[in-house]
Image (spheres, helix red, strand yellow):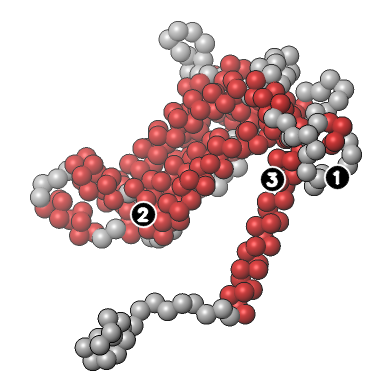
Amino acid sequence: MSAATTSYGVEPSGPKPRRVTPARIGIYAFLIVAAIFFLIPLAVMILTSMKPMDEIRGGNIFALPLNPTLDYWVKAWSSACTGRDCNGLAPGFFNSMKITLLAVPISIILSMLNGYALSFWRFRGSELMFGLLVFGAFVPFQVLVYPIIFALSSVKLPWGGTLFGTLPGIVIVHSIFGMPILTLLFRNFFASLPGELFKAARVDGAGFWRIFFSVMLPMSVPITIVAVILQVTGIWNDFIFGLVFAGRENLPMTVQLNNIVRTSTGTVEYSTNMAATILTGAVPLIVYFVSGKWFVRGIAAGAVKG
């Protein structure tokens, strides 16, 4: 008897190769066309960023560069002019890193605690508070710009000045505006967990913080990855908050990119502009490429349940 058969002479059942069907061919054809459609702008940007200006003036944006160069990437990073300063995108990159690294953990920790409390430690008015938080996720932030300016300008710092136009100020703004949607995600995730876990921990005498750190936190890794991806990309790509609240010394990379594109001495350097745009969007792209599968797993683990 061959190794591929059982003692009854029947071959074991298992996953069979998927057949090629017209429906499957259509799905893959649609996905390939959609991918090409969305990748064309990126390809044009990369090609343009490596072309000298005389090749760009030729008019064929899809042509490969005859004399490819990375000089424009170096210029966009270190010496492109943003107004009267010619330091490139480098200062904006480090400002964006500071803002992101501070605002992301603060907003996630607060939202995780909110979702945990609203799921397992409900109090009188908790549903109303949750409704207000969710409502805050859909309020246009442009409406709140002036009230926030007034509020931050009213907070005096011990070393002088106010919170408006400072690094702590922009971090607070991003943390607050990230909380509503993240609270909704964490609350729905915790609500999808078996209630017996919480009850068993309560029977063992565990309190609010013990249950959170010993039970809920280890189980919330998938949804935490989702929250990190959403916050990193949202904060990094932000323009209006950085422009209004960061102050001149803390302008993020997106604002620096806008200044580079709008600064002109008579000739628009499309190569430098394209290189600067790709550099600015590199961090969100890397985040999505590296952690995309965990994002899908987090969503499937309960991000939209509840």
Q: Residues within 10 Å of mark 2 (few under 14, many from 20)?
A: many
Percent position (x, y) of residue 92?
60, 24
Image point (78%, 34%), residue name: 67
Tell me the distance, in whole angstroms, between the alpha carbons under discs 2 and 3. Answer: 35 Å
Q: If you read the primary sequence from the N terminus, does the residue marked by circle 3 or circle 1 appear first?
A: 3
Q: Look at the image and tell me whether residue 182 can be seen.
A: no
Tell me the distance, in whole angstroms, between the alpha carbons under discs 2 and 1. Answer: 50 Å
Of circles 2 and 3, which is in front?
Answer: 3
Disc 2: which residue: 189
Image point (68%, 51%), residue name: 39
Disc 3: which residue: 42
Q: Is 82 left, or right, of 233 in this rendering?
A: right
Percent position (x, y) of residue 13?
33, 83
Q: Is residue 304 above or below residue 20?
A: above
Q: Amino acid at mark 2?
A: Phe
Quick one: which residue is furthest to the right in this view? 58
Mark 1 lies on a secondary structure that is loop
Q: Looking at the figure, which quarter contains the C terminus?
A: bottom left
Of circles 3 and 1, which is in front?
Answer: 1
Q: In which quadrant of the rendered view does residue 33 lie? A: bottom right
Tell me the distance, in whole angstroms, between the alpha carbons under discs 3 and 1. Answer: 15 Å
Q: Looking at the figure, which quarter contains the N terminus?
A: bottom left
Disc 1: which residue: 60
Q: Is residue 12 above or below residue 80?
A: below
Mark 3 lies on a secondary structure that is helix
